[in-house]
Amino acid sequence: MKIKTVKLSIIKMPLKHPFTTHLGSVTEREAIIVEVEDRNGLIGYGEGVAFSSPWYTEETVKTSYHVLKDFLIPLLKKKGIGHPDEASLLFRSVRRNHMAKAALETALWDLQAKKEGIPLSKLIGGTMEALPAGVVVGNPNLPESLKQIEVYLDQGFKRVKVKISPEDDYAYISGIRKQFPDLPLMADANSAYSLKNVDRLKALDEFGLLMIEQPLGYDDIVDHAKLQAQIETPICLDESIVTFDDARKAVELGSCKVLNIKIGRVGGIGEAKRIHDYCHSKGIPVWAGGMIEFGISRAHNIALASLPGFTIPGDISGSDRYWEEDIIQPDIKVDNGIISIPERPGIGFQLNKKRMNEVTVFEEHFHF
């Protein structure tokens, strides 16, 4: 890959509505946008999905930018790669910092697909033409949540995820089930529980949830195996799975029956695809998680979720879910609960340069 320049931009945009978990509320989103331009003028786009503070993982926008600028981009400039599937090996000398790695690696995948003139979904082996869309309700207030769910179901969304905590989990889920007895419903705990709460979690079995996501420690797979043996509801692991080996060990231990795959969390499309392929071979369903991201990351998620093992609707909603105006064009749209997979080369979307200019707070160029 003959790279000419890499551009990093930090953008900031308010959410249309606050997104709340037991860890706190997000009202404004920062992100890093990566543009990799080759000698022929083609540009690949990536997005760094770390948050401004380290509440989800240890990475932040500032630390990701530091790792990109001072380590990953110099590595790429010094050694180069022939294909984006070599990026994970090149970046291996840098420990963790998966979101920084994914920001640059996904831009390289987009660039490669554009060079070959094919959609990114096809380049990585995707087989689907359209995706069922799920949605997250990040409101702890039951009456408000019920109103939101009603709106989303009217829009055709195929699955709803809600946030839970030990304080009111049973009453909250029970209230939703009373109004929506047949809703494909999952609960995300964001590590709010411990093994002391087994009885609380067992009580949720009666509601027929699709899964409970990451109920225990954010870096745990051992206690999750103990919990899964005691409850009927499938456990889905999220934060615990940051590498292929994490996924393999979790499956071997029986720590989960479902896996969430987030490109940023695992370090890029290459590692995400390895995890998908392994889970698919073991009969473990996977789904694409969301990071309250902008359109570039969402477009990469669409490509990844076209792989055959993604049998559960992911957290891939339309551009208007969080933003008054996204940074891509055309907008990602959900049509009666379905998202079409782009047929254009690469991620299938262009940068909305006018919007980018409005929301960019800092940018820097690196010449090769």
Image: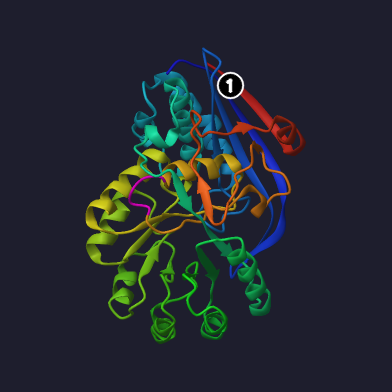
User: x, y (%) of residue 300?
Assistant: 49, 40
Image point 54% across, 78% down: which residue?
180
Q: Residues within 10 Å of mark 1 (few under 14, many from 20)?
A: some
Of 205 and 237, nearer the camera is: 205
Mark yes or no: residue 137 visible.
no
- Looking at this rendering, what residue extends furthest in the right direction? 358
On the rendered structure, is 185 left or right of 28? left
Residue 66: which quarter of the image?
A: top right
Image point 50% across, 67% down: which residue?
190
In the rendered image, residue 102 lying in the magenta stretch gets the answer no
Q: Is residue 241 above or below residue 47?
A: below
Q: Is residue 33 above or below residue 180?
A: above
Q: Is residue 155 above or below residue 330?
A: below
Image point 44% across, 81% down: which residue?
207
Magenta segment boundaries in residue numbering: 306-310
Of 325 and 7, nearer the camera is: 325
- Looking at this rendering, what residue extends furthest in the top direction? 39
User: x, y (%) of residue 360?
Assistant: 72, 36
Characterize the magenta stretch by its predominant secondary structure: loop
In the rendered image, residue 307 lying in the magenta stretch gets the answer yes
User: x, y (%) of residue 253?
Assistant: 24, 65
Count how many numbered circles sit on residues in the image: 1
User: x, y (%) of residue 146?
Assistant: 63, 75
Of 182 and 303, nearer the camera is: 182
- Name the residue that disc number 1 marks: 366
